Image (cartoon, rainbow, N blue to C red):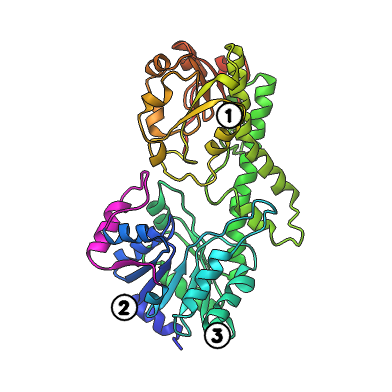
């Protein structure tokens, strides 16, 4: 059985082999960072085309990820990172990090750990007793005890979590900032013992510049789910405030700016909806600790944020009606399909919900997104002849659009700005009739201009 002191020694001299299961938005940059710090890293992913790309030194993640393509090419060329579809290739790993999906069931909002269980069972059959198994996937409270440990026991055929040292170190990353977030942001290192947490901290310290806060497993589980639930609730308040301002004929952006001058207030940015892999599901992971899963505040916030694409659709229909266009015969150009600016990540995309709403009304919909391969064609072809453009994502390419050129390509000068990329005054100046999220009719004269999006 491996002793943690020996593992710490192999971390210090870089003789430890590190395994990473799941080479997506988290696992791939983590694997590359460890390889760049001198470790031999074996990455496992079930997608053969992704594995082939990585081994060829090509980054499978599209969108702007500063330094990641170069880092990946460097470590694969040096032979320090190798990708495979075989869990058996992890047999000599001293520590294995698991970064697989932990989705929520769309019917009952309960966590579904099938991918996590499969990964645990597969690696347990390969690893030596005493190896360190770290789950980086975001999980609900007590999942390490109730899901991970039993799966490791089944896979290894041994009791007591298969004899493995267990850790949970949830990531804090955002597409477009993966390497920067992984290096600079603090991490909670939750271990099954203080000694395990210390060993994990020594491992992560090889590339993490932020704080590494030691905790037990349950605390680590709660921290990540709580912080994303907190953000979801605060976004919901911003979105509800936007709806109030629209109804009252006010400008939420002016209201937000002035509210945030009061100490301790930080109203977030309203918008067209909340997407991505984490925020739409992590509040439900947190609520899963309750026997009934009944968390009224979380449920209300989720309902508000999930309603925003439908609200954008309603604004679109309203603007079309003012121009005398029946939505059932309208052509709508949707700009942006990723959930986040300058990213290719379409997980839980608000634009997907919007497109569904528009098509249900009978509208003909075209979509453009410079970072999403399926929609990365010509912007001009996408908007040409459309009755209205709906700007859903604040991609840098859209921020620099010529409004006059866009106006001339559309059949009608109609715009829905669901991210406040342009001021209503700027749109009106070139002849657009528009609706901006959070701004009621007649209120645009008080708007100072677009707010910088982080």
Mark whose residue sits in front, 2 or 3: 3
Q: Secondary structure at mark 3?
A: loop
| Residue drawn at the location 45% of the way across and 46% of the way down | 345
Q: On screen, 286 above or below 320?
A: below
| Residue drawn at the location 64% of the way across and 55% of the way down | 105
Disc 1 residue crowd, few under 14, some 14–19, many 20+, Cα 10 Å: many
Q: Secondary structure at mark 2?
A: loop
Label 1 sits on residue: 358
Q: Is residue 53 left or right of residue 302?
A: left
Label 3 sits on residue: 157
| Residue drawn at the location 51% of the way across and 24% of the way down | 332
Q: Name the residue at the left extreme.
A: 77
Residue 223 occupies quadrant: bottom right
Q: Secondary structure at mark 1?
A: helix
Asked whether the residues under the numbered discs 2 and 3 touch, taking CB atoms below 8 Å apart as contact, a structural biologist would say no
Disc 2 residue crowd, few under 14, some 14–19, many 20+, Cα 10 Å: some
Magenta highlight range: 57-86
Q: How many marks?
A: 3
Tell me if residue 77 is in the magenta stretch.
Answer: yes
């Amino acid at each position: 059985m491996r002793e943690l002191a020996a593992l710490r020694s192999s971390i210090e001299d870089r003789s430890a082999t590190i395994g990473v299961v799941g080479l997506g938005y988290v696992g791939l940059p983590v694997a590359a960072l460890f390889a760049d710090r001198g470790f031999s890293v074996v990455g496992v992913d079930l997608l053969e085309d992704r594995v082939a790309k990585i081994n060829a030194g090509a980054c499978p993640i599209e969108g702007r990820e500063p330094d990641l393509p170069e880092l990946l090419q460097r470590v694969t060329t040096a032979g320090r990172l190798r990708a495979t579809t075989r869990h058996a290739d992890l047999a000599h790993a001293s520590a294995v990090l698991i970064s697989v999906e932990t989705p929520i069931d769309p019917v009952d909002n309960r966590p579904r750990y099938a991918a996590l269980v499969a990964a645990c069972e597969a690696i347990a059959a390969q690893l030596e007793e005493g190896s360190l198994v770290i789950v980086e996937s975001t999980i609900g409270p007590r999942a390490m005890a109730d899901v991970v440990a039993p799966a490791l026991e089944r896979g290894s055929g041994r009791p007591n979590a298969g004899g493995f040292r267990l850790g949970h170190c949830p990531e804090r990353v955002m597409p477009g900032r993966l390497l920067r977030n992984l290096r600079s942001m603090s991490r909670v290192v939750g271990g099954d013992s203080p000694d395990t947490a210390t060993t994990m901290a020594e491992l992560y310290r090889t590339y993490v510049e932020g704080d590494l806060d030691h905790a037990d497993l349950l605390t680590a589980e709660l921290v990540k789910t709580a912080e994303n639930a907190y953000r979801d609730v605060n976004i919901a308040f911003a979105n509800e405030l936007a709806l109030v301002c629209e109804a009252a004929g006010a400008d939420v952006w002016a209201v937000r700016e002035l509210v945030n001058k009061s100490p301790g207030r930080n109203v977030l940015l309203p918008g067209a909806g909340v997407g991505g892999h984490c925020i739409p599901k992590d509040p439900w992971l947190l609520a899963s600790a309750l026997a009934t899963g009944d968390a009224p505040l979380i449920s209300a916030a989720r309902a508000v944020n999930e309603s925003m694409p439908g609200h954008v659709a309603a604004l679109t229909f309203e603007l079309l009606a003012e121009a005398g266009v029946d939505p059932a015969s309208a052509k709508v150009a949707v700009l942006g399909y990723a959930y986040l600016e300058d990213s290719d990540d379409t997980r839980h995309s608000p634009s997907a919900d919007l497109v569904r709403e528009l098509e249900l009304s009978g509208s003909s919909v075209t979509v453009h997104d410079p970072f999403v391969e399926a929609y990365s064609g010509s912007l001009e072809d996408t908007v040409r002849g459309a009755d209205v453009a709906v700007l859903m994502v604040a991609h840098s390419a859209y921020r620099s659009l010529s409004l006059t050129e866009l106006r001339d390509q559309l059949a009608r000068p109609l715009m829905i700005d669901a991210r406040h990329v342009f001021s209503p005054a700027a749109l009106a100046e070139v002849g657009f009739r528009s609706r901006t999220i959070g701004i009621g009719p007649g209120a645009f004269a008080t708007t100072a201009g677009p707010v910088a999006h982080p």
